[in-house]
Image: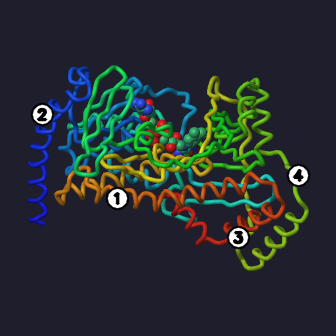
């Protein structure tokens, strides 16, 4: 322990020297790039985080709060202007379902209390059902876990909560808003020469030892790394809106119905409002945005309630299985709840976002690491996207702190390789699972409909399987 502490202190001292030296070295080195570069050089940092979305800001906050990392010089660059959050009676149309792991991370960072002080809605029951058959699966917090299934939080409130805590910490983190990064010059050689040059569109330039790409799905950091990126568009859009329910109720249930065009989900906001995520083909999504309000509400209620054509063979097989499960004393899926009807849609709350899959085969390069949507992008059907990003933040912070504690440099390949391996081991199976679900439910080929219906019925009857699904979704 003592040896480790000494190593850590020595490393800090050493890093301070390196930092000053590298700024000096840079002033000599810059002459080689361009005369402008020298004039607009704004500083050398240990870490630059490119992108101040929910994931980038939470990394800055986690680093500021970690006693082993709080002495690092960190710069967060965000293209958008600084936003000033004002609680309003109406809800934002952009919400996320956050899992228990995210809640633990945000609680440990003191961020969760800022969300709770404004508003969030717990999800205590979740029902997912298929429009092509009678089967469904449900998850109840009372049956399966000691805590809620998930929490619905508005994106802007989440960002505000993270930033409130980030600004409250007296740390070495600098934040620059309205800071659009134009290009990156990444280290050409392997460790230990890991200095990256970050060029802003106003001509300013920064350098750093470790560059973190938290710049979203179209990440320019990822492009500069030159890594392979596996991606495809779903040709679908997620239509979002804030909905008024026909009747007031406890409203702690998340509903998801699989339509032949994609899933439609209602996420609870309060006793009379829910948030919509309706994934459908691009043309259909654009039409839904144009519909007059009453026609949109009719289309929505149709999507939740309409009986779709069903195959008699699937019906027969699922009712046999249902009878068998009932005889065995297991859940046969008959005890279902009915989804709410929608009465109206909040003015100007409809919007649509393109949906795509993305997987960066590498999350790291010398002196560079990717987090959040920059590294992985998923279909919103399982509400996992930003939860995966927050998982990256947690693991990256812990591994970097361990590395610094044991005397390693911030861009040392040992911890970075561990980061990539730990995160890909979690993120890739989750991405595959979501992809399989998406493909299973967007076909109406009879054997597939039969297989998925029986599979869902069995999963619903077997508590250990449901617990396994919940455990994967919660991490
Ligand atoms: C319809 C829909 C529903 C969803 N629902 C859920 C859900 O229920 N649960 C869930 O977990 N996830 C959900 N997601 C996914 C979630 O929204 C994303 O995973 C999350 O927003 C990604 O956050 P991020 O910080 O990684 O990226 P982003 O939010 O894209 O942030 C990137 C930031 O980088 C900045 N940036 C980019 N380029 C530059 C540059 N050149 N210079 C400076 N700054 C730059 C941008 O301005 C931005 O602020 C949903 C997504 C959609 C589309």
The reply to whether dot 3 and dot 2 touch (C-beta < 8 Å) is no
* Residue shown at the point (52%, 51%) measured from the top left: 150
- The numbered disc on residue 309 is 4
Q: Quadrant of residue 170?
A: top left
Eyeballing the image, is 100 above or below 20? below
**What residue would you read off at disc 2?**
24
Residue 203 at x, y = what percent? 31, 21
Q: Is residue 458 above or below residue 271?
A: below
Q: CA distance from mark 4 to mark 2?
A: 72 Å
Residue shown at 24% from the left, 58% from the top = 402
- Asked whether mark 3 lies closer than 8 Å to ligand 1, one says no
Residue matched to label 1? 417
Q: Between disc 1 and disc 3, whose residue precedes? A: 1
For discs 4 and 2, the disc positioned in front in the rendered view: 2
Question: How many numbered marks, from 0 up?
Answer: 4
In primary-sequence order, the first of circles 1 and 2 is: 2
Q: Secondary structure under badge 2?
A: helix
Would you name the residue on which mark 3 appears?
Answer: 458
Q: Is residue 259 left or right of residue 175?
A: right
Give the camera-side residue of 445 and 232: 232
Cα separation, mark 1 vs mark 3, equals 39 Å
Q: Earlier in the sequence, mark 3 or mark 4?
A: 4
Q: CA distance from mark 1 to mark 4?
A: 51 Å
Disc 1 and disc 2: Cα gap in Å?
A: 30 Å
Which residue is drawn at the image coordinates 9% and 43% (left, top)? 17
Task: Tell whether circle 2 marks a residue whose Cβ is less than 8 angstroms from ligand 1.
Answer: no
Mark-to-mark CA distance, 3 and 4: 23 Å
Callout 4: 10 Å neighbours few (<14), some, many (20+)? few
């Amino acid at each position: 322990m003592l040896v480790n502490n000494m190593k850590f202190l020595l490393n800090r001292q050493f890093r301070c020297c390196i930092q000053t030296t590298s700024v000096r070295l840079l002033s000599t080195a810059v002459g080689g790039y361009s005369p402008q570069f020298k004039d607009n050089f704004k500083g050398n940092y240990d870490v630059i985080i490119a992108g101040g979305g929910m994931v980038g800001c939470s990394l800055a906050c986690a680093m500021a709060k970690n006693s082993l990392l709080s002495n690092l010089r960190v710069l967060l660059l965000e293209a958008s202007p600084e936003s000033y959050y004002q609680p309003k009676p109406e809800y934002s149309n952009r919400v996320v379902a956050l899992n228990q792991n995210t809640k633990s991370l945000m609680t440990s960072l003191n961020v969760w209390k800022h969300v709770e002080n404004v508003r969030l809605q717990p999800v205590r029951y979740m029902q997912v059902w298929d429009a092509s058959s009678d089967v469904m699966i449900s998850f109840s917090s009372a049956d399966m876990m000691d805590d809620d299934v998930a929490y619905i939080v508005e994106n802007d409130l989440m960002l505000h909560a993270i930033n409130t805590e980030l600004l409250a910490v007296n740390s070495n983190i600098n934040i620059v808003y309205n800071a659009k990064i134009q290009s990156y010059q990444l280290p050409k050689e392997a460790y230990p020469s890991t200095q990256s040059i970050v060029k802003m569109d106003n001509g300013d330039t920064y350098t750093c030892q470790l560059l973190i790409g938290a710049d979203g799905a179209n990440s320019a950091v990822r492009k500069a790394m030159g890594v392979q990126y596996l991606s495809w568009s779903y040709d679908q859009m997620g239509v979002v809106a804030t909905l008024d329910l026909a009747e007031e109720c406890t409203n702690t249930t998340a509903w998801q119905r699989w339509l032949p065009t994609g899933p439609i989900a209602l996420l609870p906001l309060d006793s009379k409002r829910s948030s919509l995520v309706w994934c459908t083909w691009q043309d259909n999504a654009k039409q839904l945005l144009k519909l007059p309000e009453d026609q949109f509400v009719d289309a929505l209620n149709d999507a939740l309630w309409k009986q779709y054509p069903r195959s008699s063979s699937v019906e027969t097989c699922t009712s046999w299985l249902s009878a068998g499960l009932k005889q065995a004393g297991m859940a046969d899926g008959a005890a279902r709840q009915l989804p709410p009807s929608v009465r109206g849609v909040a003015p100007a709350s409809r919007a649509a976002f393109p949906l795509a899959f993305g997987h960066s085969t590498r999350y790291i390069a010398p002196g560079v690491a990717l987090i959040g949507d920059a590294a992985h992008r998923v279909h919103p059907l399982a509400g996992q996207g930003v939860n995966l990003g927050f998982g990256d933040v947690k693991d990256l912070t812990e591994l970097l702190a361990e590395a610094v504690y044991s005397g390693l440099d911030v861009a040392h390949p040992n911890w970075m390789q561990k980061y990539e391996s730990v995160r890909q081991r979690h993120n890739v199976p989750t991405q595959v699972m979501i992809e399989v679900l998406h493909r299973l439910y967007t076909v109406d080929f009879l054997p597939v409909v039969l297989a998925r219906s029986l599979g869902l019925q069995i999963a619903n009857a077997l508590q250990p399987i449901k617990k396994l699904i919940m455990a994967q979704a919660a991490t």
